[in-house]
Image: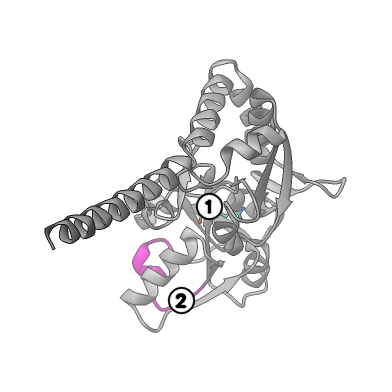
Amino acid sequence: MKKRIIAVVMALFCTTALIACKEKAGKAGGTNTDGLLNKGKLVVATNASFPPFEYVGDDGKPDGFDVALVKSIGDELGLKVEIEDMEFDSLMASIGTKVDASIAGMTITEERAKAVDFSDPYYEAVQYVLVAKGSKTKTYDDLKGKKIGSQMGTTGDLLSEDIKKDENSTEVDTYDKAIDAVNDLVSGRLDAVILDKNPAEVFAKQYDKIEAMDGKAFGFKPEQYAIAMPKGDVKLTKKVNAALKTLKTNGTYDKLVRQYIETE
Ligand code: ARG
């Protein structure tokens, strides 16, 4: 009898230890780095409708600051970079399943950091408010009860929802592409569009009728863009951060900022 109890206890102990071991291995092993670094290719998703960070170039291929930056990171790591264009709202679910990483002017948020690992930040942004020229909308309170547009799944979308929570009569319209929201603003179907600083400035320049206002006046906080990678892919995150550091110290990063962001 005593022997049997010992055997059962031993068996239980062994199974628990095995499960614990397996779990640890799963975590430490990460999602897919080794395979992918050996393949010599990094598949990176973006949403190429966010100038100057990503847009479809004249040759029909994704271009922009983020695209150039991640290609330079690939060069540093000896990896060929393949860009896949998709809806912004599909990026999170694709990281670690369909693609190895994403670069899309994506802001680090607590919620996203639960599902992916972020690189070190590579750009500071803030949400801007696009309005018709001469509009009286100048503060956060002025946005309450207005018709606000934003790109689906973005931080601008979250802020619009916050305004709606504060004032239920606010109408929030979300779009697959920010440019579609901008067009609705230009044609008067929206009162405002909440969108990241640099794309907002690009669109404000393209359309005479609208202007871009600094979101700081609306109480919007600075945001940090980072590259998103599969959760637990420590090796890849380390390599990407090391490459980012090199590009910042060797002048490549500044060159790309001048080339794509500070164009005048
Ligand atoms: N920074 C915002 C966010 O992370 C918007 C990013 C949109 N990017 C894009 N490529 N469309 O939610």
* Depicted 141 relative to depicted 129: above or below: below
Dots 2, 1 in contact, CB < 8 A: no
Task: Point out the tag, 2 or 1, that comes first from the N-terminus.
Answer: 2
- 53 left or right, relative to 240: right
x then y, percent, for residue 183? 68, 68
Q: Residue at x 41, y 64 (%)?
A: 159
244 shown above or below 193: above
The residue positioned farthest toward the left in the image shown: 2
- Reply yes or no: does residue 39 show up in magenta: no
| Range shown magenta | 137-148
Which residue is denoted by mark 1 in the rendering? 196
Q: Is ligand 1 within 8 Å of the beta carbon of the residue shown at mark 1?
A: yes
**Label placed on residue 146:** 2
Q: Amino acid at mark 2?
A: Lys
Q: Residue furthest top?
A: 250
Q: Identify the residue shown where x is 36% and y is 64%.
A: 140
